[in-house]
Amino acid sequence: MEEQLWINDNIKTAMMLTVVLYRACMFFTGSWFDGVSPIYNAKYIAVFARYLNIFHVQTFTMASGFLFYALRKEKSRYCTNFQSDVKKRAKRLLFPYVATTVLWVLPFYITYSGFNIRQITYKYVLGCAPSQLWFLPMLFWLFIVAYIVFQNINQMKLAYVQVYLLQSGWGMYLTRSVSSISCKLRQQ
């Protein structure tokens, strides 16, 4: 099990690095900040960024889910008290999100996009487009869902849950791809 956790940590680390690489690519595609055009617009970097976007977030999330499952089943962590475990996870994930959003992200957002309370609430309070630290609330909600799902689950039920999640993920991916293509076609 230790070797599997080591491999999983390496996968998570590699995916974190691809997220950083993806963000660096976005700087040259004009997608980094709203309303700011890049000095140098590189089409080949945009293609590379789209390629990274195919797998880097999904793989990072899958590795995080595996780590949670392994720690819960093999090491008996996160199975004592739901409230206590959620508080620990909130301190570890949501506190850095809120602190960084208030001290770093919002000042930049307000400087470049203006003060719009509806957009700030939508993007940062509800977490619908939370800029650089989107993965922290995502991991928190993933933890909550996984905690509930794995509470009383046997192997057969786990297989059903995995199939459902794979189908749902594939469906969301297809929906997002089709809607993105249709938006681009409407703009032309």
Image (cartoon, helix red, strand yellow):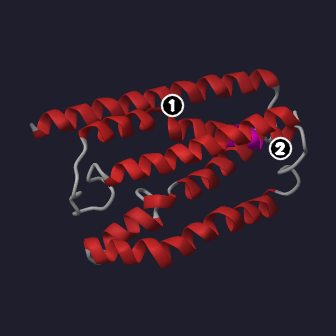
Q: Residue at x 74, y 25 (%)?
A: 157
Q: Is residue 91 above or below residue 153?
A: below
x and y, in percent, of residue 61 in the image: 60, 41
The residue lying toward the viewer, choosing from 78 and 102, is 102
- Which quadrant, please, contains the N terminus? top right
Quarter of the picture holding the C terminus: top left
Q: Which residue is identified by label 2? A: 71
Residue 177 in view: yes
How crowded pointer 2 is (Cα within 10 Å; few <14, some 14-19, many 20+) is rated as some
The residue that mark 1 highlights is 169
Query: Front-most of 3 and 130?
Result: 3
- In front of the other: label 2 or label 1? 2
Q: Position of residue 57 (x, y in %)?
A: 52, 41
Disc 2, SS: helix
Q: Position of residue 148 (x, y in %)?
A: 72, 45
Left or right, 170 with reference to 185 = right
Under mark 2, the amino acid is Leu
Residue 34 within the segment the image draws in magenta: no
Task: Tell me where the magenta segment starts and ends, as one range.
Answer: 64-68
- Residue 80 marker: none
Q: Is residue 130 visible?
A: no
Q: Amino acid at mark 1?
A: Gly
Q: Quadrant of residue 33?
A: bottom left
The residue shown at (74%, 66%) is 87
Question: At 41% across and 74% down in the image, what residue appears?
Answer: 106
